[in-house]
Amino acid sequence: MMVYEWMPFTTDREEYTQTSFEAVIGDAFESMFFAEDDPIPTYIWTVNYVVIVKRSSKIFTDITFKKVPRNPVNA
């Protein structure tokens, strides 16, 4: 499901609000994609990046962010 308004999500270590996410990534939020019944987004789009949200543990809910430039020619 694609959403264009921030939906807060929580891991075992941290709660992510739009403000905290934008501080970590260093860019402004635009939209996010959630897979079926998953409370954590799979992809988050910002002005300059597509952020891939990867789970880094199977036992605990922990994630990492991978930033991919949306327009690599200008990066």
Image (cartoon, rainbow, N blue to C red):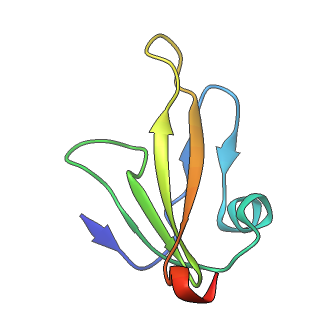
Outermost front residue: 73
Q: Picture coordinates of residue 21 (x, y %)? A: 69, 60
Reply above or below: 1 against 52.
Answer: below
Q: On the picture, is 13 further left or further right than 39? A: right
Residue in the picture at 59% in, 39% down: 64
Q: Compare residues 44 and 40 and report the one nearer the observer.
A: 44
Q: Compare residues 3 and 48 and report the one nearer the observer.
A: 48
Q: Picture coordinates of residue 25 (x, y %)? A: 71, 63
Residue in the picture at 62% in, 25% down: 12
Residue in the picture at 80% in, 64% down: 23
User: Which of the image's four quarters has the N terminus?
Assistant: bottom left
Q: Picture coordinates of residue 36 (x, y %)? A: 19, 47
Outermost left residue: 36
Outermost top residue: 59
Residue in the picture at 59% in, 81% down: 48
User: Which of the image's four quarters has the C terminus?
Assistant: bottom right
